[in-house]
Image (tube, rainbow, N blue to C red):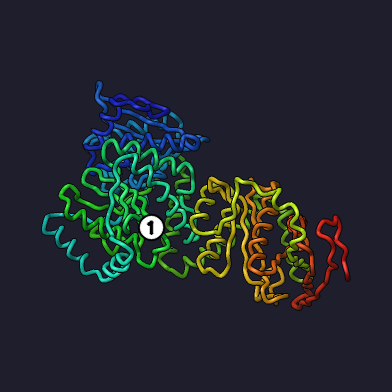
Amino acid sequence: MRLILHREIPEDDGALRRQWNELVFQMERPEVFYTYEWALAVQRAYSSSMLPLMMLAYESDSLVGVAVLATGVTRAGAFFLAASTADYCDFVCSPGRRNEFIQVVLAELRKLGMRMLTLANIPADSATARGLHAAARNQGYYHFARPAYSCARVLMGSSQQRQEIKQSMLPRRKIRRYLQAMQKQGPVTLSHLKNWESIDEALTCFTTAHVARFLILGCVSNLASPARRHFLSQLARLLSDSGWIVLTRLMIAEQPVAWNYGFQFCGSWFWYQPTFDSRLEEFSPGFCLLSKIVSEACDNPEISVVDMGLGAEGYKKRLATSSRQSLHVTLTTSLGRHVHGVTRHRLSTAAKASPGIEHGIRSVVSRIVPIRQSLRVSGISRFAACVAKFVWAKLFGCEEVLFYEWCESGNLNLHQKLSRDVALKNIDLELLAAATMHYVDDRETLDYLLLCVKRVRPGDAQGFALVTDEGVPLQFCWASPFEEFHIAALNMKLTAPSPHAVMLFEFWTPVSRRGRGYYEMTAQLVAEQFRRRGKSIWTFSVASSLSSVRGVEKSGFQRCYSLIRRNILLWHSMSKRTYAVVPIAATEVSVAS
């Protein structure tokens, strides 16, 4: 067996593609994740973060084995190229020659000085799982395999079993009730997109719904990453030529409400990346979509299994008839690292056996992690100073919050500042999803957007965003009735100065957009909108935040009064300071004690 090492996957190599995929079809369980197209899509999308390490084994001129690995930019260790994208990973080779091929690959890795190899999501029923341990020992690697994921599946079986599966789904009351509720809005149907042009057109809507859905769950979707979106786009383009890609949509009339970016490959229909329109969450459109896919698979003799992939969601278990286990395998030349990995896994397994212990450990870790991050960034001395300052503020601190009212007479530069390229829009889930994708590398803005989601759903406040013609948000703010508004800095609720007072709060400018006047522009636009409704418009700023104070006072707001909270050990006192009204254009503000 002759091994050839490649540092990249050749583009548009028809011969390699054909031989590679013929080997995939010889696997004990062929998967779309093992194909040439999948590896090429990963390389195109993630070339900036990983370096391919592909090994091709030949007998004469015949390809007999493919190992698609990669290293990080530091080349500290190797891993499956598709590890972060594929539900199953494996060495591509016929089962009868798998052990021989693994031996050759590991020997080559030792020659390259690779001290660690991380192999994620190897199917437990693969010949690779059985042959790795002996091959690792022969090449001087310590081997450790642990369970990774249990993938729920629906096995079709015989014609009678297919009908039994289908019949078992029909009486499900919830599914019928959900479908009937959606049918009141229009006919409910399935749509299967398989050609590149139609999939490409539908991906934007699918991506937005996926990012919005994860925001509601308090998470950032992997589709917020440009690399992930590029990967799915390239994968659809490559797989559509062979008919292996299928984007299935649950439609109400002409409107998609649930999606599954999936595959039909060698008798498997894969539930890979699903999502649904969060506005219809009460009708469980995602579960209805999966149920319809299983039902349709029962009627298709070419489909032998519906594989629901990674994740232990409860809805999968309700439909599954079996499962497939995957393994996470670590090979290392370091005994210390090997022992550390084994010990950590066993302690984790023991903790999970007791929900109380696991919850306690997670709670402690959640408190320790931010402290460790602060220590890493600030250093011990600065961190200690911050802690001391925080404690002093709680015991003896003084916090002043300034309150401002918007003055129409101060809005002199409004029309000069406004650009035809921007507009004020209400904040909704779609806008927040677009902002998440645009500012995915801005951690502070992502935290702010996750906070916004909590305000969008209850509807107790109204959000506004200044956006470009392309839909890119530049500035955010919120408005709420002044009466009973809670000020966190003072830990109190406010009494409105007038019956129709509105409070503007939580202004936010993404880091890359600061210093361009978007704060002032947005504040003036929102204030003008409320003024036309007969409202008085207020905002506030903590006095110690000089940048915030400057922004407010440049936006046409007049300082009116402040509330001051003084802490004395466990007691506190509150006082009010009133400011004299001066022309908005004045450079200094006079104070009346």
Residue wearing tag 1: 276
Q: Mark 1 belongs to which amino acid?
A: Phe
Toward the top, the furthest residue is 60
In the picture, which quadrant includes the N terminus?
top left
Q: Is residue 432 visible?
A: yes
In the picture, which quadrant includes the C terminus?
bottom right
Dot 1, crowdedness within 10 Å: few (<14), some or many (≥20)? Answer: many
Q: Quadrant of residue 412?
A: bottom right
* Relative vertical location of residue 516 with respect to residue 55 in this rendering, above or below: below
Q: Whole-percent x and y of residue 100?
A: 27, 33
Using the image as rendered, state which of residue 17 and residue 63 is in the foreground: 17
> Would you say 275 lies left or right of 587 here?
left
Using the image as rendered, state which of residue 293 and residue 128 is in the foreground: 293
Q: Quadrant of residue 567?
A: bottom right
How many marks overall? 1
Q: Is residue 142 visible?
A: no
Q: Whole-percent x and y of residue 449?
A: 56, 57
Q: Residue at x 73, y 54 (%)?
A: 382
Q: Residue at x 18, y 61 (%)?
A: 165
Q: Secondary structure at mark 1?
A: strand
Q: Quadrant of residue 111?
A: top left
Q: Whole-percent x and y of residue 177?
A: 29, 70
> Would you say 455 lies left or right of 39 here?
right
Q: Residue at x 63, y 67 (%)?
A: 533
Q: Whole-percent x and y of residue 366?
A: 55, 61
Using the image as rendered, state which of residue 20 and residue 454 is in the foreground: 454
* Relative vertical location of residue 126 with respect to residue 450 in this rendering, above or below: above
* Relative vertical location of residue 209 with respect to residue 280 in this rendering, above or below: above
